[in-house]
Image (cartoon, rainbow, N blue to C red):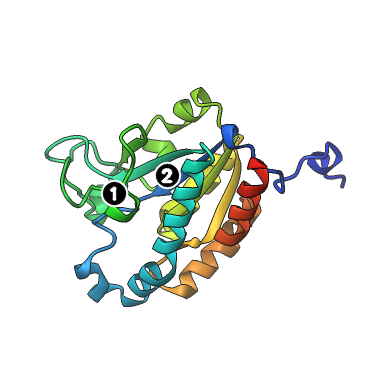
Amino acid sequence: MTDRGAAKGLTRDRPIEPQRTALLLVDVQNWVVNDRQASIRPEFDAAVRAMVLPNMVKLVEACRRARVEVLFTVMENLTRDGRDRSLDYKLSGISIEKGSWDAKVLELVAPDEDEIVLPKTSSSVFNSTNIDYLLRNLGVEELVVVGFLTDQCIDHTIKDAADRGYYVTCIRDACMANTHARHEAALACFAGYCRMTTTEHFLKLLAAARQ
């Protein structure tokens, strides 16, 4: 069977066009990374502090310099009692108070005053926010995804973005699951939906785009 996409010359390995690219940080918030969670998920916490967060800082700084749109999504209720949450969030006991410390983006990568932060109450940001509408208004074709957790919200977001017609890039060393094993299994699961790369390689692509 002929691969019709390949016949048209379509590929995920494209040069980065900053004006058509957005970096999305998923659930990089206080509720996910804190001292309490460190005792519950030590493997996750160690990887995040040693590798993932430093890589996110590099990515955010480089994208801002290149004028790549930087967006954030956080788990956060829209109502005081959380009645707006998805059924899955209610069943899972995920309830993050509107405007709370838990809902805030981590200070290391805190959004600038003109960057978009979208509160969500589902695994995929495409299901409980208007991100698709916003990305199209911004002229975004390539969505670069980082954040937590690789096997949950990252997985859902990447697959939904791909199905909606975005070129998707996952920065594999700027994401993490509860364990390295789960992280690697998730990457293998959704690899077919995106360009999979590292922070170092993406920064080289971005630098080349600015020359």
Can I make out residue 111 in this image?
yes
Q: Which mark is residue 124?
A: 2
> x, y percentage for residue 39?
23, 76
Q: Which mark is residue 63?
A: none
- For this orientation, the residue located farthest to the front is 211
Q: Tell me the distance, in whole angstroms, between the alpha carbons under discs 1 and 2.
A: 17 Å
> At 45% from the left edge and 27% from the top edge, which residue is drawn?
134
User: As displayed, is residue 21 above or below residue 148?
Assistant: above
Q: Nearer the viewer, residue 160 or 118?
A: 118
Q: Secondary structure at mark 1?
A: loop
> x, y percentage for residue 129?
37, 33
Q: Badge 1, how many Cα within 10 Å: few under 14, some, many 20+?
A: many
Q: At label 2, which amino acid type do we have?
A: Ser
> x, y percentage for residue 92?
26, 55
Where residue 19 sits, quadrant-wise, is top right
Q: Which residue is mark 1?
A: 105
